[in-house]
Amino acid sequence: MLRHGLWAAATGMRPAQLKKDNGVSYRLLNGVECLREMAGIETPANCGPLSKDAYLMERIGFTAEKIAEHQAQDRGVIDTETLLNHLSRFTEADLEAGFLEHLKVIRHKRWLRGGVYAADGHDILIRHGRGYQGARRISDGAYGYKLLVLLNLQDDCG
């Protein structure tokens, strides 16, 4: 993600409902959200241990001073409520713009070539599927997989 520009696309999404830039930068909060998704943590409210990981927080841009200050108090670098408030500020238009920015990076890298594409994603639930390899917890007692589909809708594209 870092080398190919996808990280910049993900962390560069500024919520339209963000009135002013104070406190924790929206880029850092977006970075924490990306890490949460990649770690398979179900909800932002459960990412307290993630925000205590000094190495990961430093990699996404938090300063060593801020990390050390919060570690001394045995707290995460951000409060989970801060992340939830940040995510609630995104509008549907913000999310669509972020998706299009990701597609722009993917097309620039020539991972996708011309044509019309459709993308979709959903969770495949497996009741009591705790032992399944790679399955993650989706809801109470249910485990499963995330299915992401990208289809080229044009027949004449090579």
Image (cartoon, rainbow, N blue to C red):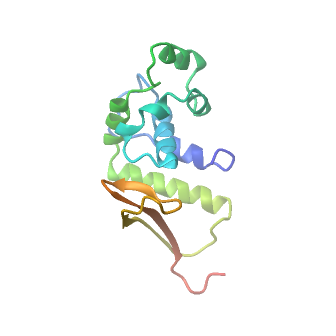
Rendering coords of residue 19 (x, y %): 33, 31
Asked whether the viewer can see residue 12, the reply is no
User: Is 111 or 94 nearer to us in this picture?
Assistant: 111
> In the figure, 1 relative to 51: above or below?
below
Name the residue furthest bottom: 155
Rendering coords of residue 49 (x, y %): 46, 32
Asked whether the viewer can see residue 111, the reply is yes
User: Is 93 or 118 nearer to us in this picture?
Assistant: 118
Q: Residue at x 36, y 52 (%)?
A: 93
User: Is 14 or 10 nearer to us in this picture?
Assistant: 10
> In the figure, 51 relative to 109: above or below?
above
Rendering coords of residue 70 (x, y %): 48, 17
Assign the C terminus to one quadrant of the image: bottom right
Q: Is residue 25 left or right of residue 46?
A: right
> In the figure, 6 relative to 44: above or below?
below
Count of numbered circles in the view: 0
Q: Residue at x 41, y 22 (%)?
A: 23
Rendering coords of residue 60 (x, y %): 57, 34
Q: Residue at x 54, y 30 (%)?
A: 53
User: Is 58 or 152 nearer to us in this picture?
Assistant: 58
